[in-house]
Image: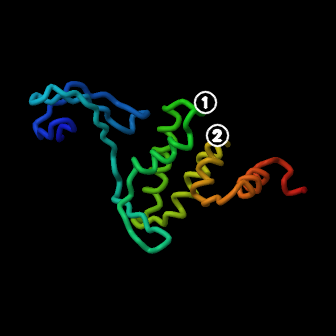
């Protein structure tokens, strides 16, 4: 593993332990060249996933990119980081278990929104505002009114 501080490729593992409910391994590493310490995580990857964007462009699935957008939506919300990590791992497992290597970006967005709606409505609306490209306050109002019980009766 390359040192993120000096680029040395000869780093040493100082400590390993299970992480994220035993679906990953957390490793503390040490660089003998610069004495830097850093953490890496190893996860099982069942298959290489490719995201197919709505414009047809294809790119490798990036778990960290998805996790960043989820964490942005969850900022300052009363949800434990472990629960967020479990949700992210669950989404990735669900994507890997489809049996397909090409995953439409729309499917990923819908799965993320579904998971967020079960955990935190504010994060769900935040994510939806970017995912569905809200343009003004009326878009928020319409979306939130659909979340309210009895909205169909209006």
Distance of label 1 from label 2 (alpha carbons): 9 Å
Label 2 crowding class (10 Å Cα cut-off): few <14, some 14-19, many 20+? some
- The structure's colour scheme is rainbow
The mark that comes first in sequence, 1 or 2, is: 1
- Drawn side of residue 111 relative to residue 61, left or right: right
Residue furthest toward the right? 154
Classify 78 as above or below 140: above
From the top left corner, tell me how far across and down residue 44 is, in percent.
Answer: 33, 46
Q: Nearer the viewer, residue 40 or 18?
A: 40
Label 1 crowding class (10 Å Cα cut-off): few <14, some 14-19, many 20+? few
- Drawn side of residue 99 relative to residue 15, left or right: right
- The residue positioned 50% from the left and 49% from the top of the image is 91
From the top left corner, tell me how far across and down residue 19 is, in percent.
Answer: 38, 32
| CB within 8 Å, label 1 to label 2 | yes
Q: Secondary structure at mark 2?
A: loop
- The residue singled out by tag 2 in the image is 120
Q: Nearer the viewer, residue 6 or 60?
A: 6
From the top left corner, tell me how far across and down residue 136 is, in percent.
Answer: 69, 57
- The residue singled out by tag 1 in the image is 78
From the top left corner, tell me how far across and down residue 48 is, in percent.
Answer: 34, 59
- The residue positioned 20% from the left and 25% from the top of the image is 14
Quarter that holds the N terminus: top left
Q: Secondary structure at mark 1?
A: loop
Which label was assigned to residue 146? Answer: none
Quarter that holds the C terminus: bottom right
- The residue positioned 35% from the left and 38% from the top of the image is 24
């Amino acid at each position: 593993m390359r040192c993120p501080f000096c680029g040395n490729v000869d780093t040493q593992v100082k400590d390993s332990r299970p992480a994220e409910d035993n679906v990953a391994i957390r490793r503390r590493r040490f660089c003998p060249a610069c004495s830097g310490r850093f953490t890496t995580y190893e996860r099982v990857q069942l298959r290489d996933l490719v995201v197919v964007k709505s414009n047809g462009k294809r790119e490798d699935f990036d778990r960290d990119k998805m996790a960043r957008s989820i964490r942005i939506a969850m900022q300052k919300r009363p949800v434990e980081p472990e629960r967020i990590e479990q949700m992210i791992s669950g989404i990735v497992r669900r994507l890997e278990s489809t049996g397909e290597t090409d995953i439409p970006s729309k499917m990923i967005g819908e799965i993320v929104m579904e998971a967020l709606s079960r955990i935190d409505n504010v994060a769900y609306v935040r994510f939806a505002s970017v995912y569905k490209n809200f343009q003004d306050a009326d878009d928020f109002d319409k979306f939130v009114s659909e979340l309210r019980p009895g909205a169909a009766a209006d």
